[in-house]
Image: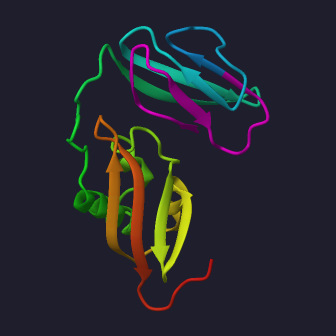
Amino acid sequence: MIDGPTTAVVGKPVKYSEISGKGSSWQWTSTESGQVDGTASEITYSFTKPGKQTVYVTINGKAKASLDVDVAAVASGSGGGAGKPKVDEATFKNMLYQVIRGKSNAGIFGTVLCGHLNMPVDFIEKSTKKQKPFMDYCMSLDKKTKIDEVKLKYDAAGCVTEIEIKQHKKGLFEKD
């Protein structure tokens, strides 16, 4: 699986990581270059052409993952822009409840997190602040989870850059 933004701007570097945790060798390619661009678990691309591009990584010589990236010629305000978040805190909280109820998964946050589904999330439960990658956090949610408060910070494009969630478990608290 690839973690990184699904939107980019021509000439601005964007970083992608292979996050399966199962790789020992990597081979990165893209539709733009058509060649091997790197062999580490992470790569930084600076796209030169606008339009839809795809980033690929071959893991351990056989497993392949891909991520589609919409590359803009200039910074666009699609779904945000300066001072215009792609999602507000109430909507984000409702999206979390879709995950809790099993009606969706972490993928619904892809556009609001600008592809950074593995970004760290701070969550507070029983007065204890913890941190997990966002996908792991979503997988740990269950029907006993009650979201009390969501605080978000945004970048200039309206993407969420920081998440803090206050929560509790209905009934008995679960052990870690």
Task: State which quadrant residue 60 falls in.
Answer: top right
Q: In the rendered view, would you say 85 is above or below 103?
A: above
Q: Residue 121, how many percent across, how many down?
A: 48, 58
Residue 126 image position (x, y, % from top left):
49, 83
Identify the image's colour scheme: rainbow, by chain, secondary structure or one colour: rainbow
Residue at image position (41%, 57%) is: 163
Q: Does 139 appear above or below 5?
A: below
The quadrant in which the C terminus is found is bottom right
Relative height, residue 131 to residue 3 (above, below):
below
- Residue extending furthest bottom? 171
Q: Which stretch appears magenta?
A: 1-27
Q: Is residue 144 visible?
A: no
Image quarter where the N terminus lies is: top right
Residue depicted at 30% across the width and 63% down the height: 93
The residue sitting at the right extreme is 24
Magenta region includes residue 18: yes
Q: Is 69 situated left or right of 152 in this image?
A: right
Q: For the point 32% across and 70% down, which residue is it?
A: 149
The x and y percentages for residue 20 are 65, 44
Looking at the picture, tell me which residue is in the foreground, 166 or 98: 166
Task: Give residue 19's quadrant in the image.
Answer: top right
